[in-house]
Amino acid sequence: MTTPKRSLRKIILLGDSGVGKTSLMNQYITKKFRPQYKSTIGADFVTKEVHIGDKLVTLQIWDTAGQERFQSLGVAFYRGADCCILVYDVNVLKSFETIQNWHQDFLKQVNPSNPETFPFVLIGNKVDVDGGNSRVVDKTRAENWCKSKGDIPYFETSAKEDYNVDAAFLRVAQISLASQ
Ligand code: GDP
Ligand code: MG
């Protein structure tokens, strides 16, 4: 047996306050959902190891600590990001419209050499709410936006019911690994 090749990838979570970024991260890392999270997690990031083929990838996931309200996250947050997860709430139109700004802001801050192919993943969270009846952004609209930005992968999730959360983060691991 050979030792798997190790690599580290910095992942950042962006999106409006309240869309479920911290809940998604906690569900992924700890398999738990708590109705209330403190806006700060007391650390800059959490890590999780994932096997992709013969590689062992350490995902270093950076969550905002409430500063997203002011749309100013500081350079340290963005610096060296390998993948950006954009999160909105399918029940809140504004949170989807703002995705455009988060996407733009990310590209401005990080200034990647190939902005067209930089790995993003879009997540539409909280699909469980009201059995889907209070949803205001339909899937096609989100998918069309993703296509217009160079085929960004799109996942619909529920951090509360642990629906599609692993699948979304697995894709994050795959595309961030493939990108270097
Ligand atoms: P953040 O500000 O983006 O980090 O959002 P939080 O993770 O703090 O979540 C904001 C609120 O939405 C909290 O009350 C969460 O419990 C709730 N929440 C997060 N994800 C879901 C979800 O998938 N379904 C439902 N019903 N509530 C969620
Ligand atoms: Mg949060």
Image (cartoon, rainbow, N blue to C red):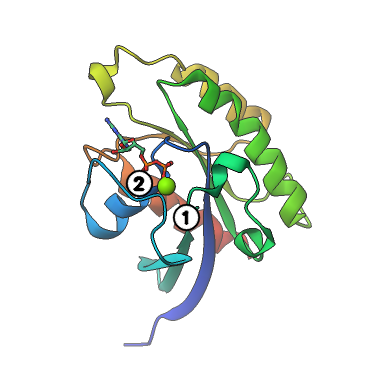
Q: Is residue 150 visible?
A: no
Q: Is residue 54 visible?
A: yes
Query: 171 and 39: which one is in front?
Result: 39
State whether label 2 is within 8 Å of ligand 1.
Answer: yes
For the point 67% across and 34% down, the residue is 101
* Quadrant of the image containing the C terminus: bottom right
User: In this figure, which residue is indicated by the disc labeled 2?
Assistant: 24
* Quadrant of the image containing the N terminus: bottom left
Give residue 50's position: percent from left, percent from top: 36, 66
Give residue 69's position: percent from left, percent from top: 55, 40
Query: 129 and 73: which one is in front?
Result: 73
117 versus 9 height, above or below? above
19 versus 2 height, above or below? above
Q: Residues within 10 Å of mark 1 (few under 14, many from 20)?
A: many
Q: Secondary structure at mark 2?
A: helix
Query: 47 and 119: which one is in front?
Result: 47
Task: Report the amino acid beneath label 2.
Answer: Leu
For the point 43% across and 71% down, the residue is 58
For the point 69% across and 61% down, the residue is 75
Task: Report the amino acid beneath label 1.
Answer: Asp
State whether label 1 is within 8 Å of ligand 2.
Answer: yes
Query: 37 and 127: which one is in front?
Result: 37
Badge 1 or badge 2: first in the primary sequence: 2
For the point 52% across and 36% down, the residue is 16
User: In this figure, which residue is indicated by the disc labeled 1?
Assistant: 63
Give residue 132's position: percent from left, percent from top: 29, 17
